[in-house]
Image (cartoon, rainbow, N blue to C red):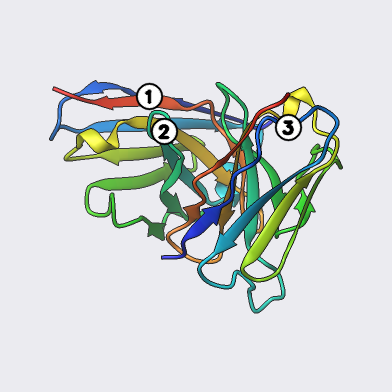
Amino acid sequence: EVQLVESGGGLVQPGRSLKLSCAASGFTFSNYYMAWVRQAPKKGLEWVATISTSGSRTYYPDSVKGRFTISRDNAKSSLYLQMNSLKSEDTATYYCARAGIYSSHFDYWGQGVMVTVSS
Amino acid sequence: DIVMTQGALPNPVPSGESASITCQSSKSLLHSNGKTYLNWYLQRPGQSPQLLIYWMSTRASGVSDRFSGSGSGTDFTLKISSVEAEDVGVYYCQQFLEYPRTFGGGTKLELK
């Protein structure tokens, strides 16, 4: 059974940093692109970052580019999101998601982890 | 960026009736490989999103055949036949053709 379990969320002050983790199991992690998607309270879904199977390629929207860094450790079947210079608008539930084998959709999602940026 | 625009539903939908959710993209999602990179997700209350449809019309594993996807390069429809209580939630379309990946704003389905 595919499982994605996020951790590392919490309350953080504006301008500070936070690192999220996602532990994957039930599939060969190194064969799949992985991503982070967030959802602000009562709002819709926003794609945050994607990383290739080897980690050599990463992709971000302009809203987080230069502040967030996605990475992975295939030996540990783990995905990470380093978030720097956090802003109040980064407050959201962050989901770890697996991109399907054809990398055309997100076929599995974690339960999400809440990040609150506030002083 | 490709903008995804979703239509609203005339809520609430009577149980057993069909419902159609529309989505429009600002650019054709038809890839040169012949596939259309449009996905549909359902987020039930208090849950994570789940994949329903990919490549515009391919049902994800385990998804009821009451869900069907159709469309052209820029206009898409998710049809739910015989709506049930478990279908309640917010439906999102998403394009996977280009970065940044973008979602529609969501369409809420409520049951009567």
Q: Which residue is mark 1?
A: A114
Work out how far the residue at label 2 is from the one at label 3, CA to CA, in angstroms. Answer: 31 Å
* Residue in the picture at 56% in, 30% down: B48
Q: Which residue is mark 3?
A: B13
Percent across and percent down for residue A102 are 66, 58
* Residue in the picture at 47% in, 34% down: A95
In which image quadrant can residue B75 be found? bottom right
Instruction: Please state which of the two labelled residues, at mark 2 or mark 3, is closer to the viewer.
Output: 3
Percent across and percent down for residue A112 are 47, 27
Q: Disc 3 sits on a residue from what chain?
A: B
Percent across and percent down for residue A53 are 51, 54
Work out how far the residue at label 1 is from the one at label 2, CA to CA, in angstroms. Answer: 6 Å
Q: Is residue A20 visible?
A: yes
First along the sequence among labels 1 and 2? 2
Q: Is residue A103 visible?
A: no
Q: Is residue B105 left or right of residue A99?
A: left
Q: Are marks 2 and 3 in contact (CB under 8 Å)?
A: no
Q: Mark 1 is on which residue type? A: Met
Secondary structure at numbered mark 3: loop
Q: Disc 2 sits on a residue from what chain?
A: A
The residue closer to the viewer here, A50 or A52, is A50
Work out how far the residue at label 3 is from the one at label 1, CA to CA, in angstroms. Answer: 32 Å
Q: Mark 2 is on which residue type? A: Tyr
Q: Which residue is mark 2?
A: A94
In which image quadrant can residue B60 be found? top right
* Residue in the picture at 52% in, 56% down: B5
Secondary structure at numbered mark 2: strand
Q: Examine the rendered structure and indicate whether residue A60 appears above or below residue B28.
A: above
The quarter of the image holding the C terminus of chain A is top left
Q: Examine the rendered structure and indicate whether residue B34 appears above or below residue A35.
A: below
Dots 2 and 3 on the same chain: no
Q: Examine the rendered structure and indicate whether residue A33 appears above or below residue A57.
A: above
